[in-house]
Image: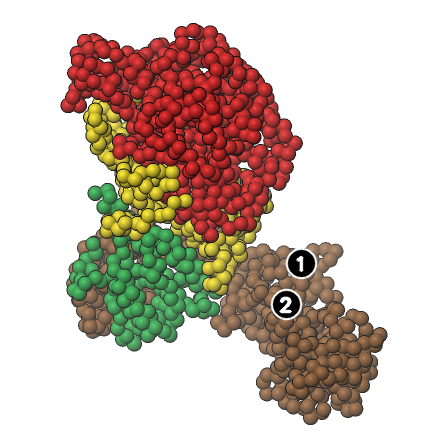
Amino acid sequence: MPDTRIGVFVCHCGRNIGGYVDVPQVVEYAKTLPDVAHAEHNLYTCSEEGISSIKRKIKENDLNRVLVASCTPRTHEPLFRSACQEAGLNKYLFEFVNIRDQCSWVHMNLPKEATEKAKALIRMGVAKARLLQPLEEIEIEVTPSCLVIGAGAAGMTAALNLANQGFDVHLVEKRAELGGLLRGLHRLFTGNQDAGEFIVPLINQVRDHEHITIHLSTKVKEVKGFIGNFDVTLDHGQKESAVGVGTIIVAVGAEEFKPAGQYGYGETAGVLTQLELEERMKEGTLRAKNVVMINCVGARVPERTYCSRFCCLTAIKNAVLIKENDPDANVWILHRDLMAYGVEFEDYYRKAMELGVRFVRYSLESLPEVIMDGEVESVRVRHQLMGKQVELPSDMVVLTTPLVPRGENPEISKMLKVPLSSEGFFLEAHLKLRPVEFATDGIYICGSARWPVEVSEAVFQAYASAAKAAMPMRRGYVCPEAITSFVNEEFCGGCGICAVLCPYSAMLMDAKNGKRVARSIEALCKGCGTCGAACPSGAITMNHFTDNQILAQIEALTEV
Amino acid sequence: MTQKPKLALYWAASCGGCEIAVVRLYAKILDVADFFDIVLWPCIMDFKYKDVEALPDKSIDLCLFNGAIRNSEQEYMAHMLRDKSKALVAFGTCAYTGGIPGLANVANRETIFQRVYDETPSTVNAEGTRPQLSYQVPEGELTLPEFYDSVRTLAQVVPVEYFVPGCPPVKEQVEGVIQAVVEGKLPAPGSVVGASDKTVCDDCTRIKEDKRIRSVYRPYEIVPDASRCLLEQGIICAGPATRGGCGAPCTSVNMPCRGCYGPPPNVVDQGAKLLSAVASIIDIQDPAEFERVTQAIPDLLGTCYLFGLPASLLYRVRHQREAWHAGETVEPAKAL
Amino acid sequence: MRQEDLTMNKNGFEPLILGFACNWCTYAGADLAGTSRIQYPPNIRVIRVMCSGRVDPTFILKAFARGVDGVLIGGCHPGDCHYIEGNHKARRRIELLRNMLGDFGIEPERLRLEWVSASEGARFAEVVADFTKTIKEMGPLKTGAQIAVEVAK
Amino acid sequence: MTTNPVSEAVRTERRITIDPITRLEGHGRIEIFLNPEGDVENAYFQVPELRGFEKFCEGRSVEDLAIITPRICGVCPEAHHIASAKALDAVFDVDPPPAAKKLRELLYSAFYVADHATHFYALSGPDFVVGPDASPAERNIIGVVHKVGLELGGEVLKHLELCHDVVAMIGGKYIHPVCGLPGGVSKPITEEERAKIEAIARSAVEFGKVSLKVLDDVVLANQGYVDMILSDTFTHKTYYMGLVDANNKVNFYDGMLRVVDPEGKEFAKFAPSEYLDHIAEHVEPWTYLKFPYLKALGWQGLVDGKDSGVYRVAPLARLNAADGMATPLAQAEYERMYSTLGGKPAHATLATHWARLVELVYAAERMLELATDPEITSPNVRTIPTATPGEGVGVVEAPRGTLIHHYQADEKGLARKVNLIVGTAHNYAAIAMSVKKAAQGLIKKGTVVTEGLLNRIEMAFRAYDPCFGCATHSLPGQMPLIVSIYDAQGKIVEQLRRD
């Protein structure tokens, strides 16, 4: 273990630092600090001269730590790190001290204080540099194949997209056939295109694609490993099989809420849901003169507070279809608020009104009431605008219900260690910064598994997730953070606190001769260090920001 | 006799449980008596200070010192025994981290005297009599040791070779330490002996599954599942932030660990770590709700530092002493 | 005790303030304050961490035990954490720690957690200025550890 | 050593220091002042340590006091733990399930057997078994074992360990158990554990009988000891206090506090929660420990008799304050003791040892009763408190006397006010008097201070509390005493040692 030899390079940054901080004085002070073998100042440390000076001094003074006091690591750390590397020094043995952006530039009228602060910051930097350890960057190979869970519009689209890029895809569907919810749909908005026209070609392409292996009536039983190398066990009912993939896309979709017991649903054939209505229309077995649709059944209520977004449109679409098919039919839509976002949907709404579909607003306080006597007779509702009770003759009541999360979501979420929202849908890493991907690397999400979406949204989410999944597979490898946490098994008591804190599932609880021990998966760790801050047994070291390094900085801060 | 290694035991501010822990070696205690030449054991034999003072420096091979430093007599003995001993051992939690007597660092001499000699409802002391360091009785002078403002650990007073944690150290560990001494197998000076390098969780056999909690309970508020981790059931347990080796006797009877074995290796401040761990696993984002839930921990200081206040980074409560320095009179509390 | 104080000690008490800034938001915000040349008091010394969730309460107690007069922690706004919710964990730890500081006779106001985004250079400067002012008014921190030293003397 | 300097010394003012005599809360120190004639002018028993529990318990979570207060004494932490749990029941106004109360008492009874046995065999036994004048090297537990035989010696150690196992089984740890909380205990016992405990209890009862036999053979058979026990030197006529059950029988865990006067007539009987109406504490500037006394009579100083507020607690006091024992064997021995001592109350301090054996037998019998109670294995050992925390007093009879815990909590359940009166404190005044009297009876003009004499002075206080004698004889070694003879200037002129 050679003794620590630190080289300190203080930058004038022209006048940017030198104009306010007494750089020569700072350099003289730096020389007095422990383990500082060399200190100098440069007009611009980031200039060709500065960089070559660093490299030269590393050799001449066989420095094994380098500290640059200049601007900010956010812009210049890579440059100085590579300088160290080129001089044969591990780049993580470099420490950056910010005496410009956070010192000279913000204390321009206080040269004396700025100089003292610069000294203090360098003293702290040196204290940390003394304890720096070299770190290695690893590469992890990524198997160029993807597991897509769920073969609805989203899943099939994602699978097809990836397959067309030449990646092998394992498409897993728990039902006996492809298509998901779409199979039940009649026509799709906007444009009322026949659902079949969309779904059938899609199914055929998927089925015939050389790069897609379809697993019907199959469930994902177990998933091990991490980005690049997931070992997946598939349960085909009678037998099981194993596949290895590099990425995973979750496209399990959602299901329509069945409002059992509400408005006589389940008691008479005259009361059905929108999806059931579409099936009848598809079969052409719809016979109804007076249709009353009730929106927000089971949505935006205390036990299910969210809005399913497109059910208003489904109601409008189906109302229009009924009217177009039979102009004499009466169609009422009872709603609480009408969501018709975007250009096309607003047109939809207008068209419906033109065709004579009547909209009645009701409130959560006074819900509509379906009058039945074996068959539906009428619907009584308090008309909010007219402020009085009205009774609508009706031979069919259609309940507009939201999409709800799949029952198997919790199971899948546990298996993949990805989170669910409080509503039970899957939760992506970040709505704006990292949509369609989970915090856990290599696992992506699209379609109604994430949030209720209509078909076109499902499709473009599918493209997005496929594009995301393609990145590591196309590159063929991933470079995880070198600055990761490390668990010292000697001290780990296996309490498991780190495991629940890590947003990336990078902390695993292993069983070692009967006892629990935590293990950090470097490939997944992002180096945030929250596990280290919480680890009560002191077993976790957050590399490059270790307790000892930070405590040393604090001691240096308060030193005489 | 003189060939035997010399053993000394001494207690300072402590309950005597550590001494009992040694006596409770039962038959083995006789082996100890055989192996060692016991030169000092106040609860066993004469301990006129002069006799210890008379011993040459470093003539005691092993000194097991239990108890924190609360008064001048204890500090004096700590210094003397340091000089006389080759290996000075902080034996038990009080000597190691301050222990329960160290909780007195929430107060100071004046407030303690006030409570004990004035306020306590059973006390009748109209004259405000206080114990005096020196007092003239008709027959002569009587003296008392000085009661200090703060409690200190042994290592805060003199350099210490070894630390044996535990309130008290469990029998098996005491045996182990004695054995190590007998076999001359003590580790490098500065080490903690008679304990494990892992935490109490490693000793605790309760089932651990998911550490996330959404509510916190005080031990008397719920009947916990007898097989599952207490912390996972919302009962604050110091086990994860406490050095093991005790065998987790407390959790074995459904009571949480309170941290008497002190911080694990590599942990600077046991309380800070416990606090950080607890705050981390309370899985609540809404600050108001978090505030509400954490009401179930009304005494954070006592929860985090029940056995180690003097050894903590902050060492003692601040305002108490400042009030004492400013000569502020703490308003006399009402009788119970 | 601290030489930079002595030199700074022109007009009365100049507090020493430790700052922890997360790499992605607050540290960037502090840099922006610099590039915008926004002036603020020189009492603060910033330690860069990747995430406010890295800040172990031990660090804060250590700082107070060593006589730092105030500790400021800067993280990303809720929802913007580069590490999903490291800032939420930081908030929970700091909140509990503030309560405990009270038990120790240390004013909770000496420990502050602020959300400062990369675009909030001006806000960073304001926060530092305001915090420095607060601590100045509070006066120097006298910790139990310092008292211990006195006792020992 | 020559006796000359001593007799020399006796002619001028002298001072004898016995320092220290081991701990209750810290060490004890005896200062004996002689007058010019060499007679005892006065004797002071100082307690030079304080830890301030009453203060630093303030602000703690009140339930934590069951963890904190046992650290007052590592010799009898069980007493503090149980007293604390009872005080907490009161603070939360909660009534634990029957099984919980029984488990607490079972733990406590096991502890009692061990504690009394330790004292009888290891601490005071040697004074009688080996003899007060025997060589110090023999006057210890080993000496006892030699005298009574290895077999009995082994029995003693075995039963100590067995009883500690029972405590650990219920309380988690023998030293500083943790099972007690407001509303009950933290863990029920299994049938398997119960069976173990029953076996231990049966064995303990037998052990109690054996111990009584030892008392007969070595103490009562020796007229010299009996005379010493009954001698005026070791006699004090004081009030006596102890817990009694509904039938005025001795009870360690619960009941009413009963005080009898020096004639043995009931002076007061009150619920523990009313202790403040009957007991007060006096402060002296020369010691850190306070002197409790009976409020009704007031503090008259360190004097005994009917007019003095000084009262005594612990085994002999408990028997004096009660009308008998609640179990057969113990009751029989109780009657035998008083007939031998010439009726109630017995004022002979040294008879405390006998009383202690009576209690040991009771504890063992009670242990068996509880171990065979069908309810003892009930899983229902917790009542969840619902009331807002308030104020509460918890009292038990510790081996060393009545132990009072008094807490006041705020609505958050934080301890706001704490008052504690520990067993030995009640006896403080009596101990100081006994020591003085012993000294007066044994140090006369020109008397040469000898081994036996020092031990007899020590016997006076050892009778009260093993914390004093604490293992004094439990290992081969020297006596803990040294007598320093000082001249008027406090300069040491002579030292007498035991070796």
Q: Nearer the viewer, residue D203 or A501?
A: D203
Vertical side of C127 occupied by D351: above or below: above
Q: What element carries label 1?
A: strand
What kind of colouring is applied to the model shown?
by chain
What chain does mark 1 sit on? Answer: A
Mark in the foreground, 2 or 1 = 2
- Separation of residues labelled 2 and 1 (CA atoms): 34 Å
Taking the spot 44% from the left edge, 33% from the top edge, the residue there is D403
Residue drawn at x 18%, y 69% is A111
Q: Colour of chain C?
A: green
Residue with the most extreme right position: A374
Q: Quadrant of residue A473?
A: bottom right
C134 lies left or right of D399: left
x%, y% of residue A241?
68, 57
Chain identifier of the brown chain: A
Tell me which corner region of the image, top left, top right, bottom left or bottom right, holds residue C70: bottom left
Toward the viewer: C64 or A556?
C64
Residue D161 in sight: no
Q: Colour of chain D?
A: red
* Percent of width and height locating residue D387: 53, 49
Residue A234, label in figure = 1
- Amino acid marked by disc 1: Leu
Shade representing chain B: yellow
User: Residue at the location (37% across, 52% down)?
Assistant: C103
Q: Residue furthest bottom?
A: A354
What secondary structure is found at the residue carrying circle 2?
loop
Nearest to N terminus: mark 2 or mark 1:
1
Mark identifier at residue A303: 2
Amino acid type of disc 2? Glu
Q: Residues within 10 Å of mark 2 (few under 14, many from 20)?
A: few
